[in-house]
Image (spheres, rainbow, N blue to C red):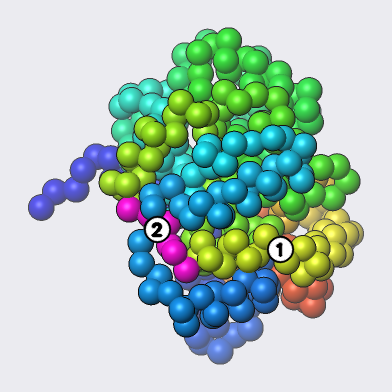
Amino acid sequence: MRNSIRSKVDAFIVMDVMEAARRAEAGGRHIVHMEVGQPGTPAPRGARDALARAMEREAMGYTVALGLPELRARIARLYREWYGVDLNPDRVVITPGSSGAFILAFTALFDAGDRVGIGAPGYPSYRQILRALDLVPVDIETAAENRLQPVPGDLAGRDLRGLMVASPANPTGTMLGREALGALIGAAQAAGASFISDEIYHGIEYEAKAVSALEITDDCYVINSFSKYFSMTGWRVGWMVVPENHVRTVERLAQNLFICPPHASQVAALAAMECGVELEANMAVYRTNRALMLEGLPRAGFDRIAPPDGAFYVYADVSHLTDDSRAFAAEILERAGVAVTPGLDFDPARGAGTLRFSYARATADIEEGLARLERFMAAR
C-alpha cells in the first residue's frame, strides 16, 4: 500500500534525541537531559490522590466530547484569577493535550490549501500538523531585534488565512507584551486571518505576567495545556477557548476525532488546579535553574543567548561553533553525556546554527549538565 503525500511530515528531532539518549542510558551511561521540554516533577500530589480515590468509585468511561463540566468551569475561573477575564465556561473545550487542540483548531478554521503563518523559530509540530491536514505552513523568520517574535509588518503580502503565535514561546522563552500582542491581533484581523494564541507556558514566567489574547479579544482561539505549569505531560490533557459561535463546530469535530479527552486525566487535572503551593514550589526550581543557565552557559562558551521571559528554555546561537547543529548535538551527547536539541527542529532555514537547552529538570541535574558542558567545550 502507498502512503499519502500528507503523511510525509518531518521527524520531531527532539524525540529522536530522546531515543538516542535512551539508548545511551540502556548501555549504562548517565545522561543529563536538557533536550526535552518536560518538567522533572510528577503531577501534583493532590491530583494523583484525587484520581486514586475516583478510580475506586468510578468506571472512568467516556465523558462528553467537550470535557467534564466541572473542569471547564474551573478553567473559566482560572482566567478570572490570572487575567481578570470573565469567561463563559461553555467556551472552554477540554482536549487530548495541546496537540489535540491544534488538530481541532486547524480543522475548524481552515480549508485544504489555506496558508497559516507560524513564527520561526517555533514549535515544530505546528508545521507538521498543518502539512498533515493539507494546509500550508508559512514560516515567518523572526528577528533578534524583535526578540524572535512576529511583528505586524511580517504579515504583509503573505495572503494568510491564519496566524499562530506563542507567548512565552518555544524554543526562545520570549513573550509578547500587551501592546505587541494587541498589534499582532489587529494586523491578523485586518488581513482576514484567524488568530490562534498558544499559551501553553503561561504560569511559567519570571519578571512579568504573560498576557492572554483573551484580555484583548474574544475573536480568537486560545490553546493551553496541563503539561507544563501543572506538570502533567504524559497525562495528555489540555484545553482550548473558542468564540461562542464556534463551540458547536468544535464539539462535532471532537466527537468524531477523539470521542472525548481521557477521563482519568480530566479528574487529575481538576484537582491539580487546587495545588498552588506545590506548583509554585516547582516555579522556585525553574527560577533557580534559569539563573544557573544564564551564568553557566556563557561560562561554558555558549554566550550568544537572550534571557528567557518565560517557559524553561534557553535558545543559543552557535553559528560560530558549527554549521550543523544536529551533528553538534550528537557530539555533545556522545562526549559530554548531555542531551540537547538541535535548532533545526524549530527553524528549518537557520536552525543549523542554534541549539535549545531545557532547564526543566531538577537543579542538581542542571548543575551537573553545565559542568559537563564546560568540560566538553574546554576540551573541544
Disc 1 crowd rating (10 Å Cα; few below 14, some 14-19, many 20+) is: some
Identified at 24% across, 39% down, the residue is 5
Q: What kind of residue is marked 2? A: Thr
370 over 310 or under it: above or below: below
Q: Answer whether residue 255 is magenta in the image.
A: no
Q: Answer whether residue 260 is magenta in the image.
A: yes
Q: Is the magenta region chiefly helix, strand or loop?
A: loop
Please give left or right for residue 106 compared with residue 74 in the image.
Answer: left
In x, y percent, where is residue 111? Answer: 33, 25
Quarter where residue 114 is shown: top left
Mark 1 residue element: loop
Between 38 and 226, the residue placed more toward the observer is: 226
Mark 2 residue element: loop
Between 163 and 374, the residue placed more toward the observer is: 163
Quarter where residue 328 is shown: bottom right
Identified at 67% across, 60% down, the residue is 273
In x, y percent, where is residue 376? Answer: 74, 70
The residue carrying mark 2 is: 63
Task: State which region is magenta.
Answer: 259-264
How many circles with numbers are drawn on the protein? 2
Identified at 68% across, 46% down, the residue is 77
Identified at 51% across, 23% down, the residue is 194
Residue 323 appears in view:
no
In x, y percent, where is residue 140? Answer: 57, 27
Check the image and name the residue furthest to the front. Answer: 57
Q: What kind of residue is marked 1? A: Glu
Tell me, for residue 274, which label it has, or none: 1
In x, y percent, where is residue 143? Answer: 70, 29
